[in-house]
Image (cartoon, rainbow, N blue to C red):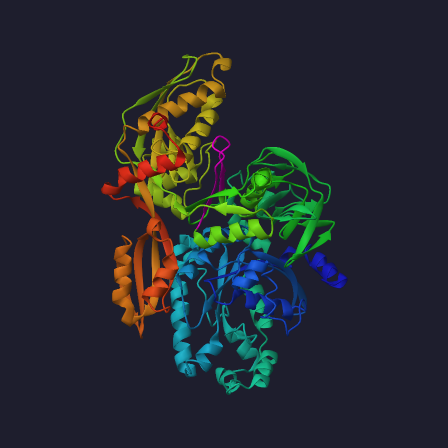
Amino acid sequence: MAEKMVDSVTKIMKLPDNIRNIAICAHIDHGKTTFSDNLLSGCGMMSKEDAGKALKMDFHEDEQERGITIDTAAVSMVHHFKDKEYLINLLDTPGHVDFGGDVTRAMRATDGAIVLVDAVESIMPQTETVLRQALRELVKPILFINKVDRLIKELQLTPEQMQERFIKIIAEVNKLIKEIAPKEYGDKWQVNVQEGSVAFGSAFHNWALSIPYMKSKGITFKDIIEHYPAGDHEKYKALMDKAPLHEVVLDMVINHLPNPLKAQKYRIPKIWHGDLESKEGISLTSCDSNGPLFFVITKIVVDPQAGEISAGRLFSGTMSKGTGVYLNRMKQSSKIQQVFIYNGAKREIVDNVPAGNFIGVGGIKSYAGETITEKETEPFEKITHIFDPVVTKAIEAKKPSDLPKLIDVLRMVAKEDPTIQIEINEETGEHLMHGMGELHLEVIENRIRTEKNVEVSTSDPIVVFRETVTAPSQEAMGKTPNKHNHLFFRVDPLEDSIYNAIKKGDLPEMRIKKKDLTIRDTLVECGMDNKTALKVKNIFKGNLFIDMTRGQVHVGEVIDLILDMFEDVIKQGPLAKEPCIKVKISLTDMKLHEDAIHRGPAQMYPAVREGVRGAFMTAKPLIYEPLQIIQIEAPADFLGDISKLISNKRGQLLDAQQEGSTMIIKAKMPVAEMFGWSSDLRSATGGRGSSSLVDQMFEKLPNELQEKVIKQIRARKGLSESQVGV
């Protein structure tokens, strides 16, 4: 960024009408990074020759080697439109499902998304996932159909055939938007060719078209096809000058995606559960740079020179160097030492930035999802991911002297990528990494070796199971060690309708401090009665806690301690210390000592643990295993080999459709059988099959495997019989 560039960026940052915060999202290999390179070159931030080859937004070595985006990259650029300057804060997100957590976090920071679809491959499973991630955070989508050059050169389609293909893709995207978006946005956010919220082109050859652009410049589709005689590169270049990609796309962004002032009016009520009529609420919904400070961290990068850099979205107030701040989830005070704006891997230091922008700050140590304010307040809703980590590896330092360094590095890794869950067991000395898939863990392991310089060895991947109950439990009592307090619990299976609402994001995962009527209404819609719905105190990782007690004077003083231990039991269930799922725990009664000194954490924690686990073990507990629905594409001749491979791995064939000479197969597969899946699929299809993840769920492990698997998990964790159920 030249000095002039920084000046123009900081000048427009003060004009929220002229800001657009956007993300680029798509299925893997649909051309996102090449596309964002061309936007950068169009705005004068890199040479045209480099665009699409330099992959400026993939600045980690492993990203360039593998040819995939692993980390979200940010850049601020200036675009001229109708004699005005606009600031586009752009995030380039990963397409591989293992790095989907980065997409979810990026969506919190943006207001609009350009959804890229490959014209040849059309809508793929990950396209649907990224749309789901965007619409869940009320991020408005527009559509770019990429790789149109392949339709002309490889498939040699006529303009009419191309049009048919575009109409089909647009109809599919609109169908998805209608299905996924909240009711009031399903119709309002449909993409439309005539209005110009759809563009098509080739990121590789750096051209794009939209109907409004074609009308204003007098270009037709036939003109485009004429520029594609066999191998004439000069003609491609002429096309780039005639319909430059950055101009068409950024004009579309400015016309169809909202500025922060508009977006925060409808996004804030969805992602912040404080009082909208309060001073904070009014400032947030109006994106007021003179209001109270609200900054949400969406990504943390650890820089060897500058330390921890927290990147995220400033929703309200002005972020200045030297500001004293409060971290609401960590309950700590801190101080901002530096404020940055972004340019891919480069950061530029600025004095202050007003609300509505994507920025980085230095000097604070926190986690993605943290809400930073000047004084304690209601934090933003937790960022929840669509898929859970289901694969685990044990990791250890090769040299014992590296052990303290490894623990620091693992903590750093957990900050940089919150979808990696790190478990450090001080007692056994075992360190576990839970990730989204084999590739995810492989990348993290590689970075620990190369970027963090720690030689490590890892175990074979292990699957993370879930514990649940299948029948109502008996009432169980937990007694505090001093015998002065008694707590009574009941455990029931959670209704599917409520679990699905949590999974969809209709029910936020949080502790419910005061009456929340929207949560109550959603629970009532799911079939819970009105009185019980108002007594729900915590929604945590797909489980519910309900306080059914009456007339308890001291409940307010102990409820947080009870919820702490409820969350602890959910993280490590009584069967084999695996996380719990679809469990509803009710506190039915309690007898508390009058004196607060007799009911502190040391007394309450063991009582809650004993009561909840005791009830759990009488509710027919069992193990659920993770399953993935996978879409497999391969030539039709290999259908027999693929179905044999699926059944050998305890899989279930759900659907098989033939499109031309290709078979599109959907199968439900247990994750435990999926290790080495890519190479097995390649050998079964002569290297011509590929697969992608559509969905993930947990279902009951077959009865004959229940006992065997529980024993294996206990043996692996070194749990004796006496430690189980306690």
Residue found at the very far front of the displayed protein: 399
Image label count: 0
The relative height of residue 417 versus residue 171 in the rendered view (above or below) is above
Instruction: Report if residue 236 lies within the magenta region.
Output: no
* Front residue of this view, candidates 564 and 652: 652
Is 74 on the left-hand or right-hand side of 673? right
The relative height of residue 3 versus residue 384 in the rendered view (above or below) is below
Residue at left offset 42%, top offset 77%? 163
Q: In this rendering, does residue 288 appear at all?
A: yes
Image coordinates of residue 350 in percent, x first then y, are 73, 52
Q: Quadrant of residue 604?
A: top left
Q: In this rendering, does residue 494 appear at all?
A: no
Is 152 on the left-hand or right-hand side of 65? left
* Front residue of this view, candidates 91 and 170: 91
Residue at left offset 41%, top offset 84%? 158
Image coordinates of residue 209 in percent, x first then y, are 53, 75
Image coordinates of residue 291 in percent, x first then y, are 65, 43
Where is the N terminus found, in terms of image quarters? bottom right
The relative height of residue 138 versus residue 659 in the rendered view (above or below) is above
The relative height of residue 310 versus residue 223 in the rendered view (above or below) is above
* Front residue of this view, candidates 716 and 280: 716
Q: Quadrant of residue 701?
A: top left
Residue found at the very far left of the displayed protein: 704
Image coordinates of residue 353 in percent, x first then y, are 69, 50
* Front residue of this view, candidates 269 and 435: 435
Q: Which region of the structure is painted magenta?
A: 422-436
Is 84 on the left-hand or right-hand side of 268? right
Where is the C terminus found, in terms of image quarters? top left
Instruction: Report if residue 423 lies within the magenta region.
Output: yes
